[in-house]
Image (cartoon, rainbow, N blue to C red):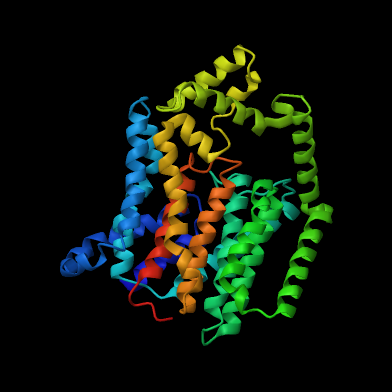
Amino acid sequence: MNVWTGLATWASGALSLSVQGGYLVFIAMAALALPLCSCWTNRLWDYAVPIVPAVILAMFAVVWLVMADRHGDIASVFRLVWPAMMLAPALLVLLLFPPSLAWLWSGLSMGGIYCGVSSLVQRIVLDHARVSGPEPLHPILFGNFSLLLAFFCLAGLGWAWHQPYRIRWMMVLLAGAAGGGLASMLSGTRGGWVMVPFLLAVVWATYGRGFSRGFSGGLLAGILALASLAVWLPQTGVKERIDIGLDHASRYLHGERGITSGARLEIWRGAALLIAERPLQGWGNREYRRGLERLGSEGRVDPDVARYWHAHSDLLDAWVRRGVVGFLALLILYAMPIVLFWKGLGHRCPARRALAACGMLLGVGLFGFGLTYSYMVYPVGVALYTSWLCIFWGFYRSPSLAE
């Protein structure tokens, strides 16, 4: 069974961004193994505390379902949040049958490598302006989740350094990091690039204290050189995307209000106006669109805002649809990795320190990405965030972790 959970863990990294529906493989494989847990009923109480985070994830799903029921949206919201309700049993399976960490790091590396190779094929062979993954991974989702894979691989270097085959593991993880970073760059996802300094800060907080000043200076210079190269090489499209974003923001702030000059800013303004009208209970899915149409007909926002089905901000979208309770539930969801893994950044065990870094990267990354786009309105966003959180936590709390 440890091999089965290992394969499930591997799939969470390797298949989530490469195969349509791959982000559900871990949950499905864990569910198939659940009946075997009845054979270890005498040990279940030992895992009561470790599975508390997964129970909180299920409570988040229940809160959103309750708020959705007030607006007649319970069916659509259930399709969105059901993966979060499955993570408690999935985490229990992972704790009862803990696989080797090699499954996790190899899966994350393979996922990053695939993203990089796929992006090169799309850009060079297929001549796509912005690369993407299988449905529903459009460029924004694909680019930012690829960026997370890249940083997960970087976090894993601390574990790899203490392995018998350290050079091979470090090469594989660096290849995964390079592939994920390349996919992010070619996806043209500006919101992800803004978060890179914050993600680097998490990695630095994990490992930076062990670096000499000379090495730290050289590392910083190398990062700046790579960033400059990415911006100024026209083939990457990075500079073009940045220029477009700055131009739109400047035009919007100088009074040219509308979708053509600042789509996100106008969408955020519409969401904020609706929140002000109904801050406690929210509007639900259907009434949210009708509310935007009404604001457009009244001339308070650009009428084209109603064409966008979400608020392009996780926190704003949660508040405007689910009310203040749904908003607070999402805040708790984002805070969970910080609470669970913060102290682990200085853990003596290299494996646990690397896992803590991954948990922190997940929380910081998705929170930052979600400031300028809505991820928790997609099943893939909910499933990947909750699955990766439980996988990192399951390994982190595993009593058998001795690698």
389 horizontally vs 118: left or right = left
Q: Which part of the image, by quadrant, shows the C terminus?
A: bottom left
| In-front residue for pair 167/320 | 320
How far across and down, in percent of the image, does residue 29 sit? 35, 59
The residue shown at (58%, 17%) is 295
Residue lying farthest to the left in this orientation: 42
242 horizontally vs 192: left or right = right
How far across and down, in percent of the image, does residue 322 sit? 42, 32
How far across and down, in percent of the image, does residue 355 sit? 47, 69
Q: Which part of the image, by quadrant, shows the N terminus?
A: bottom left
Residue lying farthest to the top in this orientation: 298
For residue 119, what is the image quadrant? Answer: bottom right
- The answer to whether residue 118 is visible is no
Residue lying farthest to the bottom in this orientation: 164
For residue 35, what is the image quadrant? Answer: bottom left
| In-front residue for pair 365/95 | 365
How far across and down, in percent of the image, does residue 158 sit? 55, 76
Q: Is 210 drawn above or below residue 198 in the view shown?
A: below
The residue shown at (41%, 37%) is 326
